[in-house]
Image (cartoon, rainbow, N blue to C red):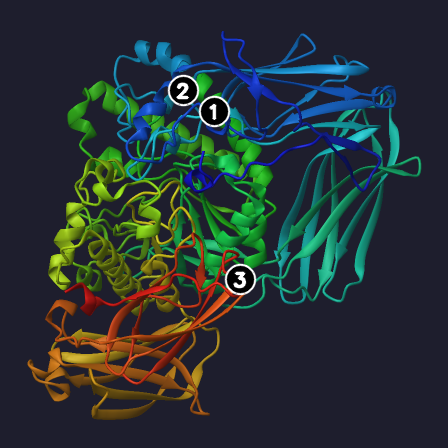
Amino acid sequence: MKSKLLYVFITCFSLLYVRANDTSETIILNRGWMFAQSGTDKWLPATVPGTVHQDLLNHELLPDPFFGTNEKKIQWVENEDWEYKTTFTVTGEQLSRGAAMMTFEGLDTYADVYLNGALLLKSDNMFVGYSVSVKEVLRQGENKLHVFFRSPVKETLPQWASNGFDYPADNDHSDKKLSVFTRKAPYSYGWDWGIRMVTSGIWRPVTLRFYDVAAIGDYHVKQLSLTDRQAEISNELEINSISSGKEEAEIIVSCSLKDGQPLIVRRPVVLNPGINHVKIPVEIKDPVRWMPNGWGEPVLYDFTAQVVCRGKTVASEHHRIGLRTVRLVNEKDEHGESYYFEVNGIPMFAKGANFIPNDILLPSMTDERYATLFRDIREANMNVIRVWGGGTYEDNRFYDLADENGILIWQDFMFGCTIYPADPVFLKRVSEEVDYNIKRLRNHACLAMWCGNNEILEGLKYWGWQSRYTPEVYEEFYRNYDKLFRELLPSKVKEWDEGRSYIHTSPYFSNWGRPDSWNIGDSHNWGIWYGKKTFESSDTEIGRFQSEFGFESFPEMKTIATFASPEDYEIESEVMTAHQKSSLGNDLIRTYMERDFIVPEKFEDFVYVGLVLQGQGMRYCFEAHRRNRPYCMGTLYWQLNDSWPVVSWSGIDYYGNWKALHYQAKRAFAPLIVNPIHENGNLNVYLLSDKLEDSAGMTLEMRLMDFNGRKLQQESVKVEAPANSSVKVFGKPLDEWADEGQRKECYLLLSLKDRQGREIARDIHYFVPTKDLNLPRAVVKSKLKVSDGRCEVTLSSSKLAKDVFVQIPYQGARFTDNFFDLLPGETRKIVITSPEIRKGVVPEISIKHIRETY
């Protein structure tokens, strides 16, 4: 399989022994795995963690599922059972230890696990980790581990057949809607941006741990109170003692402080056989608060808990903790009902996006890809990411990086866009899943809230389900909803994560087709795209918190080339249609394009103009939301990323390439921006500030320029921007700037300067849509300076070059800037970084601007 096709990194694993900061010993069981289709006895090497699809691809037993229409050719895999097996060695010394615990962090999904002939467990939930005591079945020498995966499709067919109706799981791309019965990542069954790959496999690590005396089962660093003078912390431990009688021990809790001196608290305890619960209070004087991106440093404290018995540390756990207060303020007010995050007592305007799983094959995510993801998020000035409910509870690395980068996480539970069963077995599975994931994630500073589901109440009310089902079934849907999202989930959040905000659904009241609801809670405003409304509608059709809205684009051509051949380069070709999962399709991009742009004839130009369209249109929405604060206090667009190469609403494509949308989000989300807008015949200028301090002593310079660089008019005013505000600082009738004819020949350059005359923000404003501008035939000159991993590109033009797009044929290459206007006489330097850039080799760089597409 070609390396570019799946973005999968294949690693040769070895058996790893990990020594902890205690006397325990952990073996990572990642070596020597084999897999086979059940009943064939054709065993082949496997990669663990991994999935059966990855293993089949590695052995070239599947075609590249991303290319062409190959998605249809891989569907047989989901209907088969699969087996995995390995052997490992245990020494007599290891067997002499007090206990041995085998942990499966993720089994996807219906799996029977056998060790040396003994049935260890039967898994039925992808979202749960399982730990099993195995000392009694281990053998000195060779041990055999065997995992039998049952088809998630065949497993649920009897349940579906006895149900009597199909649930309204329209994103499940199959005639029989089986996904609702299985606690498995819903997006793997398909979505309106997603390929269908219903996976099986050992998707997270397997470990074997040997220990004596006791183990720490759970460690919750619970913040009880926080002021500028003091933080009160309760260190709450669940300790499992394997001794037959009482065991004297000492619990040591240490916390690293800002000055590097550790705070240490010791507590003698007597451990009884079985589970022991211990609480140890800690007080931190003059705590330094964890702050979100843009407001300060996300300071983290290192907490370690140790269990010491007979002079030896027998167990230890470590967490990095941020001290902060976060609450979702959802209260009645003079407008209706608010919806915003208050962080450390300060209302925060949320800037960010909805996150879907970054790969259809989840084990393909590497440390490097996670680090790049959060670099992208942070550089775009985001402070909130919503982990959407149709994917998965993310890997620990995701939340660690969110902590470190100051990114708040809105965490959905994994339910989306359809009603679910609520029978006792299903509720038991959900209960175990929620217990496991709340405990796993609650220590993270980034975790801002829990949300029960995505759009299920919205669907119940507005998606026509009432007409599709009998009154009895429809009433059952509401009962199931209440059992899951108004009873079970909030009770679990209260039990395991008391004080964290919970909302039962998103949106929980507001609907984009009902203007009377926009002043209450969060909104999924799909008037743009599905409602075919203009981007300018965001000036007036605005909610209190925009938690979903978006507009599609194709990825750039180097990504399209990975899944299509030149003969497929038509927006309605079979291949392009296969990579467009939205119900409205690629033609809607053309419809919007016709409003503001001259639609190109060449497919490559259409793709480029579509990227520009998406970026500029979405930026308009971001700025409208920020301008309307404090009525509106959040803008989370759909969607940040892709799980495969596809036409979608994403701002970053599958290979990590920023679309114009992500560059425009970075500009629109900057802490302080200039925002000009046409209002009632005037050109008004606003300053939008998310800074915690007032910005004073500034000058706003406005120069009306023609496309050849000649200055036509100039204004200059002193301005101020209060902290956390949107403020109008200037207004002037449009006719006083330019008449209708002149508006096609000029632009307004707005430059915000500080007391020292340094530019701290700028904006370029056009008075008419791009299609009505008389753009010149500009020639962009470029100079390159190449070194290993880096290329400096210096651009210049004597005339305006609008929407300059610099391309390089390396996937994931990073640009300091792109999709910008090159002004006449201006010199602009951008830096491109990629490991594929080599000194002495001139990269194939191409430059495109809008006028060249006519």
- Residue 1, x across and y down, in percent: 45, 33
Name the residue type under label 1.
Leu
Position of 289 relative to 698 (above/below): above
Q: Nearer the viewer, mark 3 or mark 2?
A: 3
Mark 2 Cα-neighbour bin, 10 Å: few <14, some 14–19, many ≥20 = some
SS type, badge 3: loop
SS type, badge 2: helix
Q: Are marks 2 and 1 in contact (CB under 8 Å)?
A: yes
Residue 562 placement: quadrant = top left
Specify the farthest residue to the right.
311
Left or right of residue 456: residue 280? right
What is the CA distance from the residue labelled 3 to the residue labelled 2? 40 Å
Number of numbered discs overlaid on the protein picture? 3
Left or right of residue 371: residue 844? left
Mark 1 Cα-neighbour bin, 10 Å: few <14, some 14–19, many ≥20 = some
Q: Mark number for residue 77?
A: 2
- Residue 323, x across and y down, in percent: 62, 57
Residue on which the image places disc 1: 56
Name the residue type under label 2.
Val
Position of 728 relative to 20 (above/below): below
> Which of the two labelled residues, at mark 2 and mark 1, occupies the earlier sequence position?
1
> Which of the two labelled residues, at mark 3 and mark 2, occupies the earlier sequence position?
2
Mark 3 Cα-neighbour bin, 10 Å: few <14, some 14–19, many ≥20 = some
Residue on which the image places disc 3: 789
